[in-house]
């Protein structure tokens, strides 16, 4: 009893997010977001990914950083329920759990062979830049997909989405961000990065994304971009 298993970091992922703020709340919600998985030296061997190119999606098991707790908390307040309603921690995907491990299903776009070994190019990732990855497994549709399964409390939040304004200011500011990144950014903004209990149309939020500081506000069901500045 009480024995612990030591696990190694096998890889780290590169994404546009240097901060937690703005990261999609689930993988796949911003399908245009691109990421690169680079293996640690010990595991950077093309033989380790033989056959993986035959799968369209992969599972990532990774670490939530900076969320360790000294005491176990059996209940948490999911942000998408407004931060006022409690749920059992094992009924949520909260980072505040006994072992701060995340699970994401991402699309495998291609496998690149480099002098340092394989690099996995993925899309739809919901991970912060440089997040440690502990394991990678193929997504197997016949075993992993259950489209008719009950959704629990997530049924009331899954359809929530904002519109990104098409006003001249927003359109002009977004042109600063290059094409592929721009579409990913628009998907992120549509997912509403704000805390669920915020509802001030005059408040301007700042989000770091791919080397830019994105300023935006939300009025009713629409996101307005108010500033895009180079953050490097």
Image (tube, rainbow, N blue to C red):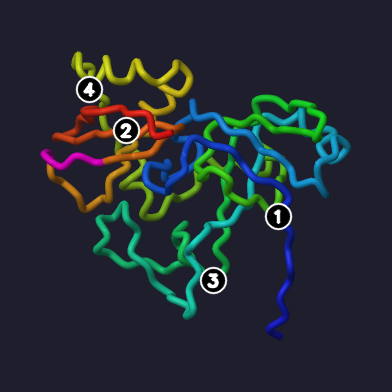
| Mark nearer the N terminus (1 vs 4) | 1
Local SS, label 1: loop
Q: Which residues are magenta?
A: 201-205
Q: Could you tell me which quadrant the C terminus lies in? A: top left
Image x and y of residue 223, in percent: 23, 30
Q: Could you tell me which quadrant the N terminus lies in? A: bottom right
Q: In this figure, which residue is indicated by the disc labeled 3?
A: 98
Local SS, label 2: strand
Tell me if label 2 and label 4 are in contact, CB under 8 Å. no
Q: In this figure, which residue is indicated by the disc labeled 2?
A: 214
The disc at residue 9 is 1
| Mark nearer the N terminus (3 vs 4) | 3
Please name which of the two marks, 2 or 1, marks the residue nearer to the observer.
2
Distance between the Cα atoms at labels 1 and 4?
A: 41 Å
The disc at residue 165 is 4
- Residue at image point 52% right, 33% down: 124
From the viewer's perspective, is 80 left or right of 15?
Answer: left
From the viewer's perspective, is 220 left or right of 56?
Answer: left
Q: Is residue 195 magenta?
A: no
């Amino acid at each position: 009893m009480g024995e612990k298993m030591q696990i190694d970091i096998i890889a780290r992922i590169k994404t546009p997010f240097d901060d937690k703020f703005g990261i999609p709340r689930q993988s796949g919600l911003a399908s245009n977001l691109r990421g690169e998985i680079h293996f640690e030296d010990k595991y950077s061997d093309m033989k380790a990914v033989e056959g993986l190119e035959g799968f369209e999606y992969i599972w990532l098991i990774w670490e939530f950083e900076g969320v360790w707790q000294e005491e176990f908390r059996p209940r948490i307040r999911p942000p998408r329920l407004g931060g006022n309603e409690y749920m059992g921690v094992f009924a949520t995907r909260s980072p505040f759990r006994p072992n701060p491990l995340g699970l994401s299903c991402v699309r495998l776009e291609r496998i690149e062979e480099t002098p340092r070994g394989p690099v996995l190019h993925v899309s739809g990732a919901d991970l912060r830049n440089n997040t440690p990855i502990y394991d990678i497994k193929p997504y197997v549709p016949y075993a992993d997909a259950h489209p008719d399964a009950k959704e629990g409390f997530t049924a009331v939040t899954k359809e929530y989405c904002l519109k990104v304004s098409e006003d001249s200011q927003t359109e002009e500011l977004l042109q600063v961000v290059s094409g592929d990144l721009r579409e990913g950014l628009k998907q992120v903004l549509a997912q509403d990065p704000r805390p669920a209990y915020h509802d001030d149309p005059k408040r301007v939020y700042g989000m770091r994304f791919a080397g830019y500081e994105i300023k935006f506000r939300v009025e009713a069901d629409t996101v307005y971009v108010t500033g895009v500045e180079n953050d490097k």
